Structure formats: C-alpha cells, structure tokens
Amino acid sequence: MITFDNVSKEYPDGTAAVRDLNLTIQPGEFFVVIGPSGCGKTTMLKMINRLIRLTKGTILIDNKRISDYKIDELRWNIGYVLQQIALFPHMTILENISIVPELKGWDKEKIGRRVDELLEMVGLDPKTYRDRKPKELSGGQQQRVGVVRALAADPDIILMDEPFSALDPISREKLQEDLFTLQRNIKKTIVFVTHDMKEAIKLGDRICVMNEGSIVQVGTPKDLLENP
Ligand code: ADP
Ligand code: ADP
C-alpha cells in the first residue's frame, strides 16, 4: 500500500509542482495518474522511489515512511519504467535485465528462468532475444524489455512514466493489452502515468486526474465516464 499524506513538492526555483496530495493506492491496484503536461505526474512518481525529495508531508509504503527504508531496499522493491527505456548498449538483453536480481544475490539459474518466463509473457521468444544487444531490437521490443527489467527482481510496486507514448499506435495498443493481462496475473501495484485518457480508461482500476499539482478527481473508469 502506498500512502501520500499531505505531500507537497516545491522545486528550488519556487515551482510548486505538487500540492497537498492525500491518496492511498491499494496493494495490487492498477492506479493511473493522468493530467496535462506539467501538472506534476512525474514529480509524484519520482517521490515514491526517492529520486526527488518531498518538501512537505509523508509518503508511506506499507505503513512505513519511505525515508525509513534503506535506499537499496526501497529501489529494489520498486520497478521503474520510463518513456524512453535506457538499456545499456554494450550489454545483452539478459545482462540488462539481470542487474537488480544479481544485486539481490539471486543465483544465475533462478535469474535465467525468471528472465525467460518474463520475456515469454511480453511476447519475446527468449531463445531469439536473450543474447541480443538492444540495438538489434525495435523500439517496441526494447520497451517490452524495459517492462521485463522492471519486473525481474519481483518488486511489489512498479512505477511507469508514459511507458508507451513513444511507440507507434499498433505496438502501443498491443503492449497495453499485454500489460493489462500481465497485471491481472501477477497482481503487482502499478502506478502508471499518462496523458492519454483512452489509455487510462483501458488500463486503470482507478484513475487519478491531476491539474496544476493537485488532485481533481479519483475514481474508477466507470465513475469518470459517468461524472466527467
Ligand atoms: P508532468 O510529469 O505532469 O509533465 P512534472 O512533474 O514533470 O509534470 O512537472 C511539474 C512542474 O514542475 C512543471 O511546472 C515543471 O516544469 C516543474 N519541474 C519539474 N522538474 C523540475 C525541476 N527539476 N526544477 C524545477 N521545476 C521542475
Ligand atoms: P515529462 O515527460 O514528464 O513532461 P519533461 O520533459 O517535462 O518530462 O521533463 C524531463 C525532465 O526535466 C524531468 O526529469 C523533470 O524533472 C525535468 N524538468 C522538467 N521541467 C523542469 C524545469 N522547469 N526545470 C528543471 N528541470 C525540469
């Protein structure tokens, strides 16, 4: 469970990016944050894994303040997928995905099994792709690897910042469907940022609408469609 208790973020230049957020995200929930560019979505995400400091308030994960976790413990338990996935170009797909599981001390065999299973789930044949370098994959395939990398070490939480917005419409739709199915199977907590309402409605258990750093509305897709 992720709890925002009166959280605000002001950047050093005085920009109030996020104001007095109060919010609870349930375990296993697919939680979508939507709003126009600059409304504070990325700031909100980055505060959860402590890439950005809070100015005010508290964020709790499973009722423990994020500041009370060791940073490794926190980051290893939170997968992170960005709009433009940055895989290490000199490393193979397998090596890229294995970074956090290795840090966690998993043995090679366990990592191999896990990676193959996840590649399979996102529609990449492990035998074909495991030993390739990132540049031998299309943008959509690299983005799939990004999702696998975020899931590899079995985190409880996955943060996704417009993970599909750089893709062509067909790859995007396919990946949305795959992620939807994947989420319903693995039941991880996902916080997913987008500015695309269609995507939000398709994926979210609940949708949080933001504007100028504040929450405007939180509800199920049905709530939002009935009371826009
Ligand atoms: P979104 O993800 O919704 O596009 P952001 O969280 O990136 O919004 O940004 C929220 C606001 O904070 C915007 O006005 C943005 O310009 C500002 N902002 C983001 N990062 C910084 C920063 N490092 N320094 C100053 N202002 C920032
Ligand atoms: P987004 O895809 O969320 O709109 P941006 O292109 O706004 O991302 O921002 C990219 C990066 O630049 C982010 O890490 C954000 O924190 C930072 N950033 C955004 N706005 C500002 C700003 N006004 N000053 C400094 N850094 C910023």
Image: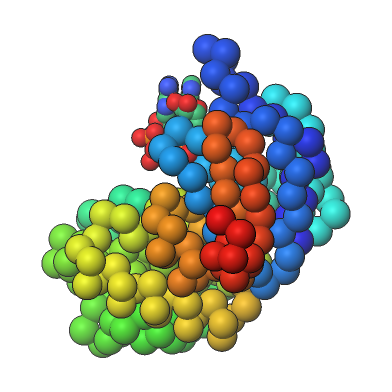
Task: Name the side, left or right, on which 77 lies relative to 167.
Answer: right
Observer-nearest of 85 and 12: 12
Left or right of 175 on screen, residue 36: right
Q: Quadrant of the N terminus?
A: bottom right
Label tally: 0
Residue 27: x %, y % from top left = 72, 68
Taking the image as shown, residue 221 lies to the left or right of residue 219, namely left
Front residue (pair 177, 206): 206
Q: Is residue 120 above or below residue 70?
A: below
Give the residue at x 21% y 84%: 128
Residue sitting at x 22%, y 72%: 170
Which residue is at the far right?
63
* Residue 10 quadrant: top right
Q: Position of residue 110 (x, y in %)?
A: 52, 82
Residue under the image location 17 percent in, 66 percent down = 138
> Is the residue 34 above or below the residue 103 in the image?
above
Residue furthest top as drawn? 13
Residue at image x 16%, y 60%? Answer: 135
For the question of whether residue 31 can be seen, the reply is: no
Q: Quadrant of residue 210?
A: top right
Give the quarter of the figure containing the C terminus.
bottom right
Depicted 165 relative to depicted 136: above or below: above
Residue 226, given in percent of the width and then of the height, sits at 59, 65
Q: Quadrant of residue 50?
A: top right
Display coloring: rainbow
Query: Ligand 2 shows up in which quadrant of the image?
Result: top left
Rendered location of residue 46, percent (x, y): 56, 42
Q: Is residue 173 visible?
A: yes
Q: Nearer the viewer, residue 149 or 58?
A: 58
